[in-house]
Image (cartoon, rainbow, N blue to C red):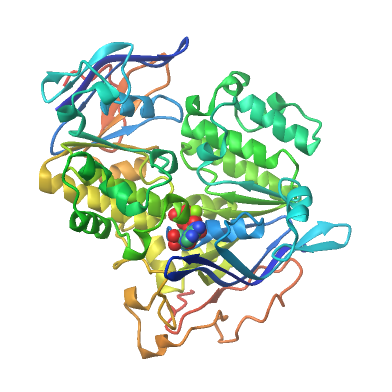
Amino acid sequence: MSDLLTVDGLSVTFRVPGATVRAVSGAAFRVRAGRCLALVGESGCGKSVLAHALLGLLPGNATVTGQAWLDAGGGERIELVGASRKVLARRVRGRLVGLIPQSPATYLTPVRTARAQLEETLRELGAPQGAAELAGRHGLRPADLDKYPHELSGGMAQRVANAMALAGDPRLVLADEPTTGLDRPLVDRAMAALRELCAEGRAVLLITHDLRAAERVADDLAVMYAGRLVEAGPAAEVLARPRHPYAAGLIAAQPDRHFVPIPGMPPELTALPDGCAFRPRCGRASEACAVLPAMAAPDGRTRDGHAAGGDAAEEHTVACHHSLEESRA
Amino acid sequence: MLEASGVTVRYGRRAALEDVSLRVVPGTVTGLAGPSGCGKSTLARVLALMLRPDAGTVTLDGVPVLRWRQRAPRELRVRVALLYQQPRPAVDPRLPLAEVIGEPLAAAGRPGPDRVRELAELTGLTGDLLGRRPHEVSDGQLQRACLARALALEPRYLICDEMTTMLDASTQAHLVGVVRDYQRRTGAGVLAISHDMTLLGRWADRVVHLGEPPFRTFAESAHQIRQVRDLGE
Ligand SMILES: Nc1ncnc2c1ncn2[C@@H]1O[C@H](COP(=O)(O)OP(=O)(O)OP(=O)(O)O)[C@@H](O)[C@H]1O
Ligand SMILES: [Mg+2]
């Protein structure tokens, strides 16, 4: 299947008094039609900023460079980083690309009911369906729609946000922690809904802290640390045999594993070291790590763009001078 | 002990909680589990003196609570801290993180930049973040600041309402460790609210289960949930 989104060399910096925050550095990945890519990584590593950069939703102190090509259908491609506000507002946001935001409660207008906000979204998009029908598909009862945001539980607010993001029938869905505040049955339901989107040929970029959910729903997985992608590949493989020491530490920190945090403080994105940013916290670090490692396949080939085409699984790549040995049988 | 007994809360005609009783015992971690929308957050707000129940009582170290929210005596209010599931609505968007963390210290008339730095470091916030406002940090970074703020006045009871739900596994393990260390050091009572039974199994000394209305019974056990009628310990 084709690439719906191809991101290359995407970087985001923020100007803050006396410093520059390097929130995303040279991100390259693709999201293919019919597939789900999960993006995981430490809190503050740049996941939400990356998603917002694709939609032109960053504040004025942000600078975005690089490219992000979106397949708009009918042979047309839109480059999102350089796209005008008008194109982003009229064609991209809500129509071609739906965003399920993190912290949905703060995205809803406090003085209007969930129904009023859903109806407005549907009207703007010229969508034929009614608010109740849309809400029902996301596990909300009609009575829930008459509530104001402060009367919605965290899980209900999440479902309203999900419904709003999908109202315009987008080809690409950016889901930023869409299961926050949901219990297991609702997480399962939300994940099944994302899987369904993929089955319909849409593409999903799923930002999540829930590695168990990622394992079940994602085809591919990318691990981010301090604004860089440090490992990527088929989700099941990366989770079973992580090769970057950071990825291994993250996976081991789950409550059903060791439940031990990665030692040390999170990196300061205003003062990133040269070379590998994980170096100060890494047990395998050596002098070699002062040089930035490139994303490479196991045999040492650096990843060359998006060579692997068609339906082939993504290659398992890692950016580390001392990556963990593959322990294949 | 922080104790709710026979608490009922209604939103309009709908009961969010009906005749619910729960004890948070100093020196222990009580887990509270239950499906989405079963009233866990409502119970958290009642126990934090933020919401007056329609019926039932709350007692704090033997003192019955008679006034709520800002009208509750300050001396009682500072004994309970509440951490919300979503940090954004819980902070003043105009304040830089250092002031968010320092808010309770300032309100208590003892502002302390050193104490703020200490709390920030404890919760894994690097110095570069302290001058930024909430919209300039990530959700997880903001939640760390909320935990730092909650610990500022060393509350006797800490209520964590889905505190780690938007955090990666390593940050979750870190912050749960911070709360556990705090609880062991000060003998505080902790109420840990979560959907995640695996997490509660690692964190809590006992787990209480809040069901869907109208079956307001509790089930309780460390790992396996057993149905019991009420909490007559
Ligand atoms: N407007 C801004 N100005 C300056 N720095 C910012 C701004 N917005 C975000 N940042 C910084 O950019 C980095 C990436 O933030 P982002 O919200 O993408 O993190 P995240 O990976 O989504 O984290 P979480 O898992 O906690 O949601 C963070 O270190 C944050 O402090
Ligand atoms: Mg985020």
Q: Residue at x 33, y 11 (%)?
A: B54
Answer left or right for B68 relative to A42: left
Answer left or right for A147 relative to A71: left
**x%, y% of residue B11?**
44, 15
Q: Is residue B207 above or below residue A272?
A: above
Q: Quadrant of residue B43?
A: top left
Q: Quadrant of residue A280?
A: bottom left
**Residue furthest bottom in the image:** A287
Q: Is residue B36 above or below residue A200?
A: above
**x%, y% of residue A145?**
61, 23
**Residue furthest right in the image:** A74
**x%, y% of residue A31?**
68, 62
Residue A255: in sight, yes or no?
Answer: no
Q: Quadrant of residue B188?
A: top left
Answer left or right for B47 relative to B187: right
Which quarter of the rendering shows the N terminus of chain A?
Answer: bottom right
Of the pair A229 and B226, the residue shown nearer to us? A229
**x%, y% of residue A321?**
45, 84
Of the pair B195 and B157, the residue shown nearer to us? B157
What count of labels does the image hold?
0
Residue A302: in sight, yes or no?
Answer: yes
Q: Residue at x 13, y 39 (%)?
A: B27
Q: Residue at x 24, y 52 (%)?
A: B178
Q: Is residue B18 above or below residue B189?
A: above
Q: Residue at x 30, y 22 (%)?
A: B218
